[in-house]
Image: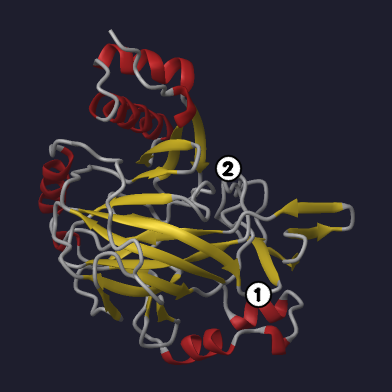
Amino acid sequence: MSRRALIAAVATLASMPSTGWVRPASGRESPGTPLSLVPTPRTVAWGYYDATTPPALRVGSGDLVEIKTLITSSPARLEGAGLPPEQVEPALREIYREVTNKGPGGHILTGPIFVEGAEPGDVLEVRIKSVRLALPYAYNAFSPGRGFLPEDFPYPRMRIIPLDERRMVARFTDGVEIPLRPFFGSIGVAPPEVSGRISSGPPWIHAGNLDNKELVAGTTLWIPVHARGALLLVGDGHAGQGNGEVDITALETSLVGTFQLVVRKDLHLRWPRAETPTHVITMGLHEDLTEAARMAVREMIDYLSTEKRLSRDDAYMLASVAADLSITQLVDGNKGVHAMIPKAIFTPPSGR
């Protein structure tokens, strides 16, 4: 793929109008028992998103899918940090032993899932119904040359962190307990085919490694579709994370999530967006943090002007007085900034 072709593809996507976006689709409100997808050597994409990857599962729009994901580390490294060998998941050992088609990134992603009817230009609505822990432990680690402060920590360190699912806390160390808010760091679709295989590391127009800690159960994520079937991949489970993810890892663990996948023909987005029970979230993704912030604000203005019918001037002012900007992460190549505006501020218009 030439750089010129890639730039042209992105420019085309960026020029698409963003119209009518956040009203939930009806989907199949009672889709029945979820389908299931677990990680095996034949049902994962290790370190990449690619529009030519064969699907591991096919589903219809509105179907529920239960997806199991794996921790982002090797059996040897986990054991080297003190994890008993019997606590390493057999599926992780099998994938490390058998999968050779991997890279350039490091995430073991479950999928892809082909969603019938999804075409480039549509939006995939990912309703995150539930997220639960699959392991009684997580890890956090840093290594030379990575993270936000590589010059300060030019050596490796890993900590195994017990998780108490009953109390929903991580026992970081004696006297330090962290509340758990499990979410998937990476939820993404295939990029445009012209992009070829891209790393699972940087988030982009396909969503992917957003590392947005707000994407917990009860949240809906909207992702622009760039390839037929969307080809959804999920992974990088986090039991919790701080905004910034400064050492490049969170509370890394394995998770099980239930998702409802709905194809939206009526939406046309340039970048991923999300809605929690209390807030609407717009996102900016760029290697320059200031540019990422500008993108998040522009996306918020676009949302307020298209969905809430405000003038662009009023949308800009409302973003300034009511939306909060946060650094999503600083360490994934493309940095992330997200803007959150509370839904409670929007009241029914008064009669005239």
Answer yes or no: is residue 104 visible: no
328 to 103, vertically: above or below: above
Quadrant of the rendered image containing residue 194: bottom left
Residue 135 is labelled as 1
Determine the secondary structure under disc 1.
loop
Q: Nearer the viewer, mark 2 or mark 1?
A: 1
Residue 243 is labelled as 2
Q: Residue furthest right?
A: 174
Answer yes or no: is residue 73 visible: yes
Q: Percent position (x, y) of residue 132?
A: 59, 67
Q: Earlier in the sequence, mark 2 or mark 1?
A: 1
Q: Percent position (x, y) of residue 337?
A: 44, 37
Quadrant of the rendered image containing residue 346: top left
Q: Residue furthest front?
A: 351
The amino acid marked with disc number 1 is Leu
66 to 120, vertically: above or below: below
